[in-house]
Amino acid sequence: MKKVIINADDFGLSKGVNEGIILAHQKGILTSTTLMANMPGFEHAVELAKQNGELGVGVHLNIVRGRPITPAKKVSSLLNKEKNFFANIFFILRKFWSKKINQQEIELEFRAQIEKILRHDIRISHFDSEKHIHCLPSLLKIVLKLGKEYNIKRIRYFNEYCLSSLLFQSAKSFFVSVSCLSMRQKIKENGFLIPERSYGVCKSGRMTSKTIKKILCNLKDGVAEVMVHPGFVTRELMDLEKEIGSFYINKYREKELKGLLDKDLKQIIKDKDIRLISFHQL
């Protein structure tokens, strides 16, 4: 059987993003999302999640943007002078590889984000992360440890390799997919479940109805995850960008939302005998 998870990242980022995600779930084909515990739209997202019980909700682990949930003095290696995360993935990776970031502090912050979501009575479906940082093998080990501890045994796994005009996205997809491949055996040994295929890195920001139709029409048996970033771009979101750093994806959110609402997608799903699921059904 062909099964597909349509997952929206960045739930909790802002009210406009939250409302776009819920619209894509109620009127479109979205089945799953991942919640950012440290962002200003968190409470609003929790309220919407409880009103939409069929929407799977995971954790979008985040040490890239915004302020930590953990007291700043306990995670100081993760923060700039303003006590925010650094907001630059290349800078973070450089500090990480030069061992200037304390991995115990990463675990502390990841744990705090998980526990905040659990305290709000959200049944967590799975893990993924901002800028896919959980795919780094040493950080994936932390996520596996926490997943076992909190009995959250599903995780985003990339195996998307591509060559396209979007050279940066192609390079990023290759990097995160190779990182995941190096940890595949470890993931399986720890009893975690992963989709067989993944889509969305190579054309991040360009997951239009045309792109999604192509994915659905060529879907093979098994489970695939399609990563999307729908939302409404509002003044709140623009102001937040100024505070915590720019989002490449913001200029494309409404286009991706429009794509998910294309009525032809539901007909293709019916014609191709595809079952829409969340990570809970993986």
Image (cartoon, grey):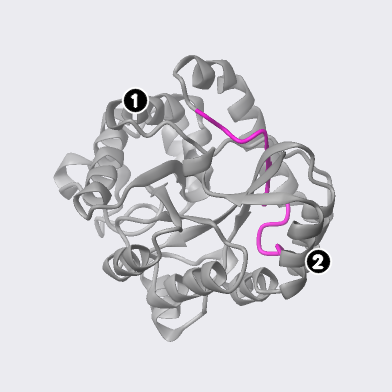
- Quadrant for residue 252, please give it: bottom right
**Residue sitting at x 59%, y 71%:** 253
What is the magenta segment's predominant secondary structure?
Answer: loop
Residue tagged 1: 148
Q: Is residue 160 magenta?
A: no
Magenta segment:
193-207
| 90 relative to 60 in the view: left or right | right
Residue tagged 2: 210
Against 83, residue 110 (above or below) is above
Separation of marks 1 and 2 at Cα, in angstroms: 38 Å
**Residue sitting at x 28%, y 57%:** 67
| 127 relative to 259 in the view: left or right | left
Quadrant in which the N terminus appears: top right
Q: Is residue 197 magenta?
A: yes
**Residue sitting at x 66%, y 49%:** 275
Let me know if residue 213 appears in the view.
Answer: yes
- Amino acid type assigned to the residue bearing label 2 in the image: Lys
